[in-house]
Amino acid sequence: MLRRCAEELKSKVNLYWNEITNNEAHGFTRTMYLMNLNVGIVNKTCEEIISLCENLTEIPEYGDPTFIETILKMAPELIENYTRNLKITTFKDYEGVIFSLGKLFSIDPNFNFEHNLNSEFSMLSTQLIYLKKSDPNIYSFDLSKSQISKNLTHSGQIPDYYDSMCLLPNNEIFCLSNSSSKAFTIKFSFTVKMHPPRALTYFAGLAYYKGYVYAFGGSNAFWEKFDLDKSVWLKIAKLPRTTDYCSCAVLGDTMLVVGYHSLKLHGYCPDLNSYFDCMDVTGDIQKSIFTGNNRGYLIEFGGRIFESEINDPFSWQNIGSNSCKKTFLLWYKALYDDAIYFLSYYYDLYRFDLKNKTINVIANLNNN
């Protein structure tokens, strides 16, 4: 199967390349530029996999629990070359890379290169993972099928209540507990990995950037980053103003941070460890910040919607209003079918249509 997928991908890429040659405006051109992914790299990777497959008598199907282990054993050099070419150098665990690589080789006709390579979201973001209070199961909602699945139980490892999450590039979910000092990661296999504890966060905003998970604000007003390789918490500069219920997202090389009491949308530069003001916002109202398709989106719940220029944290326009409940969000955001999906504290599933700039509740996942 892996060989067939590699051959199919190689054929697809060459076909896309022929189209690009005749039409420079083709979306795949921009995707390859942004990801530093060129036809030569893809073809070489596919050829190496095809060659490896010729020497194997049996390869487990994609999705088989032994798939990751088998590929890691048979092609460590391939994995290293692939990640280096994609400039993925901030984590040593290549499980997620192979998982994404396997998805990239998918023959699914609905798989969209542009969506899955050109965003802050996971290549597998059609699955929205969530938990319920006092429920030992891990749930997932398939956005492509509008279907809920109940997965393996977490056996009490995960705290009873938690609030802050962000998606990692290796298709894992980093979480901070609101009611305890626990920090943990939910792996794509629905197993749980615990991390060194933190003080109570109370709705801190989380964002991944270059091997670190950054945590901003919360009622206890702390600002730190977690080194995923070394598994250690490190201090960062404090926000200019203390605020509750923080939300943050990455736009280019800038982190956008906003909170309940905020009168400003803040930008944070990780490389300089410093903040700057992006624009004025309404204070004492729940706000959430998202990024998708290289633009920032700020929602004042029950109020205005703002959109940024492409990769520009300073240029924003008021593009409309919304009637969302004035509540804070849980979990992480998922990008699918030109829309951003997110869950509220009450398990309302929102769909933010990036084309029409409208927000609607499409389901309540607490009653399913």
Image (cartoon, grey):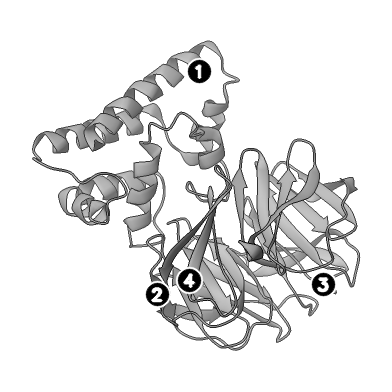
Please give left or right for residue 223 compared with residue 283 in the image.
Answer: left
Q: Which residue is depicted at the point 38% across and 31% down?
A: 107
> Please, what secondary structure does the residue beneath circle 2 have?
strand
Are the residues at dot 4 and dot 3 in contact (C-beta closer than 8 Å)? no
Nearest to the eye among marks 4 and 2: give it.
Answer: 4
Sequence-wise, the earlier of marks 4 and 3 is 4
Please give left or right for residue 152 compared with residue 244 in the image.
Answer: left
Sequence-wise, the earlier of marks 2 and 1 is 1
Residue underneath mark 1: 20
Q: Position of residue 172 (x, y in %)?
A: 45, 61
Mark sitting on residue 137: 4
Q: Which residue is depicted at the point 73% across and 47% down?
A: 352
The residues tagged by marks 4 and 3 sit, at their Cα atoms, a distance apart of 31 Å
Q: Is residue 85 visible?
A: no
Nearest to the eye among marks 4 and 1: give it.
Answer: 4
User: Mark 3 belongs to which amino acid?
Assistant: Tyr
Residue underneath mark 3: 260
Sequence-wise, the earlier of marks 4 and 1 is 1
Nearest to the eye among marks 3 and 1: give it.
Answer: 3
The residues tagged by marks 3 and 1 sit, at their Cα atoms, a distance apart of 45 Å
Q: Name the image quarter holding residue 271.
A: bottom right
> Farthest residue toward the front?
368
- Compared to residue 169, the image places residue 51 above or below, namely above
Please give left or right for residue 81 compared with residue 229 in the image.
Answer: left
The residues tagged by marks 4 and 2 sit, at their Cα atoms, a distance apart of 16 Å
